[in-house]
Image (cartoon, grey):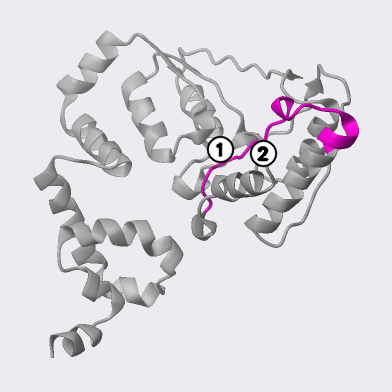
Amino acid sequence: KKKAKDDALCPIERRFSAPEDLIKLLDDSRTNKHKLEEYLPFDAMACRMYEQFQLETCQVDFDSLLAIFATTLMSNTAVVRRFRDKYRYTIVDEYQDNSEAQADLLRKIVDGGSCTVVGDDDQTIYGFRGASPGNFDRLKNWYSEEKNIALHEATLTENYRSSANILAVATKFLERSRDRHPKQLNPTKEAGHPVQVWHCKDKEGQSRRIVSSIIERHESGGICYGEMAILLRCSKMGPLGSLSTAFQEELFMRRIPF
């Protein structure tokens, strides 16, 4: 009877028997692909349970950390004054990865003081968690409102990381973006090898293709295995799971030392 009763509940309601279940739900919802209508009836309850769970366990996630900090700054002028007195100069790296909430916190702390931000709007890859390249424009607007504040902007155009071919291909892709600040990067390295684009059906096919290329370079080009590397933007990719595991299995099966 209990099983029949549980089965009558929607997937979300059945999981919420304890606050810990919400943590598991948040973790696996990406792969289970629950429909939006399954979440809506329980979103308020989910938020309350999750907030209560954080209080009871003295833990906060990144979003809650920002929210608590923002609330503190808005409600306690003494805390704001302490930050401004202690930190006369503020430097923010990777500014393109900051959300609007983080930009607002920075403005609250700096309040027209000395602030330096470094970033590249072309490298904004964390939009899924709120990163906003528009923060660069907002920063200029904020400081332009201050009559007694000087704003200095510098664009670094020399690229020391990539070969000329890689930079040329990347530039062609980036030129299609309508939200970027136009810029011309100049390579400091030689053209290098032509960029190759491979289309693979799945991660196993990708592993086979790349490992085969490594073997070919070793056998026909005389390149030592120890001089080759597989670079991954991330080790896991959503429902695809671990990408590095597929490479390890393929390398092991084909007896390639790694």
Looking at the rendering, the stretch of residues picked out in magenta corresponds to 217-237
Residue 237 image position (x, y, % from top left): 53, 52
Q: Is residue 8 above or below residue 212?
A: below
Frontmost residue, 237 versus 189: 237
Q: Residue at x 17, y 33 (%)?
A: 75
Q: Which residue is farthest front?
A: 255
Q: Residue 106, labelled with which disc?
A: none
* Contact between labelled residues 2 and 1, with CB atoms less than 8 Å apart: yes
Q: Is-magenta flag for residue 225? A: yes
Residue 164 visible:
yes
Q: Circle 1: is it few (<14), some (14-19), or many (20+) Cα within 10 Å?
A: many
Q: Residues within 10 Å of mark 2 (few under 14, many from 20)?
A: some
**Element assignment for label 1:** loop
Q: Quadrant of residue 70?
A: top left
| Quarter occupied by the N terminus | bottom left
In the image, 124 versus 197, the foreground residue is 197
Q: Main secondary structure of the magenta part?
A: loop
Q: Which amino acid type is shown beneath numbered disc 2?
A: Arg
For the point 49% across and 41% down, which residue is it? 131
| Callout 1 amino acid | Pro
Question: Which element type, helix, strand or loop, lies under badge 2?
Answer: loop
Q: Visible in this render: residue 176?
A: no
Figure check: 78 above or below 102: above
Identity of the residue drawn at 20% across and 68% down: 16
Alpha carbon of mark 1 to alpha carbon of mark 2: how far? 8 Å
Q: Which residue is mark 1?
A: 133
Write down the residue under mark 2. 180
